[in-house]
Every structure is written in C-alpha cells, then in structure tokens.
C-alpha cells in the first residue's frame, strides 16, 4: 500500500498522516512511561482528539473527516512505525466510533454527540435481564483496551429476543461512569494499550444503545432505509472490516523493525571475524529476505482490503475464513520478520527499552489476539475450501 499514492489522492489524508506521525512520535518519546503505567498518557489520547484521528470513522453526518478503509489502515500503520501500543488505540478508538453507526438514530445521536471515546469487548461474558424497554446488564470482562480514557464501553452479552429461536450475541453500550474499572493489565507486550477489566452490576441500557451484530453482518447496513450509502462500513462484511487494523499494526511495526535492523547492522562488526556486517553476505541476505517478505505482507494487505471493498460487487461470496486466513498470514509474516531480525542481531538487541526489544514484544502480542491466531484461521479456511461450514465470524 503506497502512502505516497494515498497522499496524492487526498489532501485530507495527508494532514491526517501528519497527525498520525505526531501521535506516534509522542508515544515513542513516552514509551517507558507507558510501560510503567500500563497505558499511554492523556497527552497521547488528547493528540488523537486534537488531530481528529479519533473521529475519522464517524459517519460524515456528524462532521468528522470520514476516510476510506484503505486510508484508515494507512493511518494506523503510520502510528505503528513509532509505537505499537499507541497504534492499537489509534485503531480502536476511531473504529469503535462505527459501532453507533449500526444503532437506531436515537442511540447513535446520544453516543456520538457526547464526543466521548468508546471501548468494547465482544466476548459474551455478561448477562442481560429484560427491564421495560431495555435490559439490565451484569458481568465481568477482561482485555478492554483503552478503557481508562473512554466515556463509553460496549460489553458482550447474549440476549434471547422474542422473535428469535436462540440467544443472540449483542453489545450493549454502557457509560463508563456506571461500571467499575479494575486496573489489572500487567503483560509481556502491548502494555500501553491499558486493556483492563470492567465489571458491571445491574446497569440499565435502553434498547437504542444495544448493538445487534448479527443483523449488521447480515444486512451490512443500519436499521433504517434512509442511510449514507458512502459510509465505508456499510456494504462490507462486519467482522472482517472491524478487524482490519490488526494486520495494519503488524505491518507498521515490521516496517520499523527492518529499518532498525538495517541501521544496527550497518554499524556492527562481529568480534569473531572482524567483518563489517553490512559487507557480509549473511546480513545482506537477511535484509533482502525480510524486505521481500515485508512486500508480501503489504500485497496481502491490499488483497484483504480489496476483498472488503468489493465484497458486494463480488456477490458477497468471500467466506469469513478467507479474511481470517489472509489477516493472520500477514501478522505471521510480520512476526517472523521481527524474530529473524532479533536472532540475526544477537544479544545486543535484547536490552530493555531498545526499539527492537519493544517492537518484538508488541508484534508478538498482536499475534496472540484471538482474531490473529494463525492455526485457527487456516483450519477454518481449509474447512470452507472443502465445502464444510467453518462457522468463523471473520
């Protein structure tokens, strides 16, 4: 995906990419602080708001700089060149602004007009009890990224609607002032994402603030006939589009790892033979191979986005498992690039707070996300290729 081509297409995107670079550089400067605090700072989040990047996936009726899916991916990738935890949130905060786009207008207006950030967790770990025109929500959810800076949080529950024969996974959107936040995020990587625990006890949520992903996935549009046909999240498969940022983050991180590998190798002389590594076929070969693999990841990313954008034009036939397999293959390639760089550089790359050490931990952590698990994805894709129903959601 050529950033230069994207810039030529959109002056708005050029400004947003500059903003993304500012966010990334600030997060890189504050990386050690974020590691210690298990969260990026208010400074980083406020810069996301100031640059309007937190609003880029709002429907244009709400005045945000609405961008395409490809542009969104480019912005996330740019931040990941500098700091992966910040890129994680630069992806998720704007992404979660698309959740109200599938709500009835009353719920959409309430949430969007509050101008608060949104976090979410789709895992259906909670309960919902009918109460008048809404539901009482209770439960405990881990891995809620960015919750410390959010005014809203969507939480996964199963609801049995009267017109359905089985419970439906839904995402009631609660005010964070109505839940308890437990700061339990203490991890190997992605520490700056602040993915803490949320506890809700009998919180009332009106029906207009309960997202139903199944109809959103089935119809690929909001629950109304008069809607913005240009909105990039309509007309595309819900979950595969929702997950587009994860491989973008991995690509941005791998791009930085390659740059750091080249810089460290150019200055390195091995004690065992006194050869400058930039002149050695060993490191020349490694740099060539990881760069070529990186171009493969970029090409697969373009393929992934093209399949999203052309989904309905292609007859809505691309299986969710294909998106899953493409996405995880990109992340797997980027993970292998990072490991190859580390194993070639040797022990000098292990020191804490160095860019190689931090980026490798964070890229590996991206690969552990449930939507990034390669073995799961190829098993599902293989089922679909042989005509069996994999049942994955993307």
Image: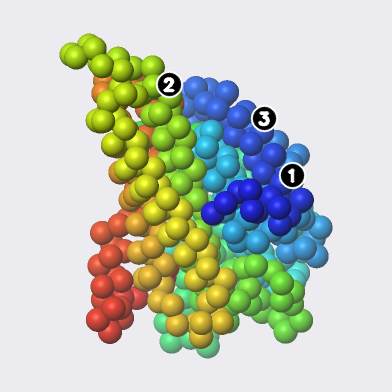
- Mark 1 falls on what kind of element? helix
Visible in this render: residue 1? yes
Q: Nearer the viewer, residue 313 or 265?
A: 265
Kindly report the distance in space between the C-alpha atoms of the residues bearing marks 1 and 2: 30 Å
Residue 264: x %, y % from top left: 39, 22
- Mark 2 falls on what kind of element? loop
Q: Is residue 242 above or below residue 115?
A: below
Q: Nearer the viewer, mark 1 or mark 2?
A: 1
Visible in this render: residue 191? no
Q: Nearer the viewer, residue 155 or 333?
A: 333
Query: From the image, which quarter does the C terminus lie in?
Result: bottom left
Residue 77: x %, y % from top left: 54, 46
Kindly report the distance in space between the C-alpha atoms of the residues bearing marks 3 and 2: 20 Å
Cβ atoms at labels 3 and 1 below 8 Å apart: no
- Mark 3 falls on what kind of element? helix
Residue at label 2? Answer: 353
Mark 3, Cα crowd under 10 Å, few <14 / some 14-19 / many 20+, is few
Kindly report the distance in space between the C-alpha atoms of the residues bearing marks 3 and 1: 19 Å
Query: From the image, which quarter does the N terminus lie in?
Result: bottom right
Residue 39: x %, y % from top left: 53, 33
Q: Is residue 134 above or below residue 178?
A: below
Residue at label 1? Answer: 15
**Residue under the image location 25 percent in, 67 percent down:** 379
**Residue under the image location 41 percent in, 35 percent down:** 258
Cβ atoms at labels 3 and 2 below 8 Å apart: no
Residue 237: x %, y % from top left: 52, 73
């Amino acid at each position: 995906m050529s950033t230069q081509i994207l810039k030529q297409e959109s002056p708005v995107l050029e400004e947003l990419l500059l903003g993304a670079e500012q966010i990334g550089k600030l997060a890189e400067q504050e990386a050690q602080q974020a590691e210690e605090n298990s969260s990026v700072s208010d400074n980083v989040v406020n810069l996301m708001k100031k640059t309007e990047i937190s609003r880029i996936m709002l429907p244009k009726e709400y005045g945000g700089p609405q961008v395409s899916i490809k542009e969104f991916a480019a912005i996330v990738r740019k931040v990941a060149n500098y700091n992966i935890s910040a890129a994680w949130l630069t992806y998720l905060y704007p992404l979660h602004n698309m959740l109200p786009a599938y709500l009835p207008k009353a719920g959409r207006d309430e949430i969007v007009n509050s101008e608060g950030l949104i976090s979410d967790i789709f895992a259906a770990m909670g309960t919902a009890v009918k109460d008048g025109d809404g539901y009482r929500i209770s439960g405990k959810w881990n891995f809620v990224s960015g919750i410390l800076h959010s005014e809203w949080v969507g939480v996964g529950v199963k609801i049995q609607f009267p017109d359905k024969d089985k419970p439906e996974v839904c995402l009631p959107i609660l005010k964070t002032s109505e839940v308890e936040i437990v700061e339990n995020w203490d991890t190997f990587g992605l520490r700056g994402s602040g993915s803490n625990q949320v506890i809700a006890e009998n919180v009332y949520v009106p029906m207009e603030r309960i997202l139903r992903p199944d109809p959103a996935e089935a119809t690929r549009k909001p629950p109304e006939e008069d809607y913005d046909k240009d909105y990039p999240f309509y007309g595309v498969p819900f979950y595969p589009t929702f997950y587009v940022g994860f491989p973008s983050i991995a690509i941005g991180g791998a791009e930085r790892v390659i740059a750091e590998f080249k810089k460290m190798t150019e200055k390195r002389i091995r004690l065992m033979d006194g050869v400058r590594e930039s002149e050695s076929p060993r490191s020349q070969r490694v740099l060539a191979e990881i760069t070529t693999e990186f171009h493969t990841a970029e090409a697969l990313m373009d393929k992934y986005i093209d399949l999203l954008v052309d989904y309905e034009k292609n007859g809505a036939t691309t299986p969710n498992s294909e998106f899953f397999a493409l996405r995880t293959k990109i992340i797997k390639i980027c993970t292998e690039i990072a490991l190859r760089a580390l194993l070639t550089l040797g022990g000098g790359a292990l020191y804490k707070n160095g860019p190689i050490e931090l980026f490798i931990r964070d890229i590996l952590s991206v690969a552990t996300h449930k939507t990034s698990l390669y073995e799961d994805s190829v098993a599902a894709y293989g089922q679909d290729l042989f005509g069996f129903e994999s049942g994955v959601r993307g």
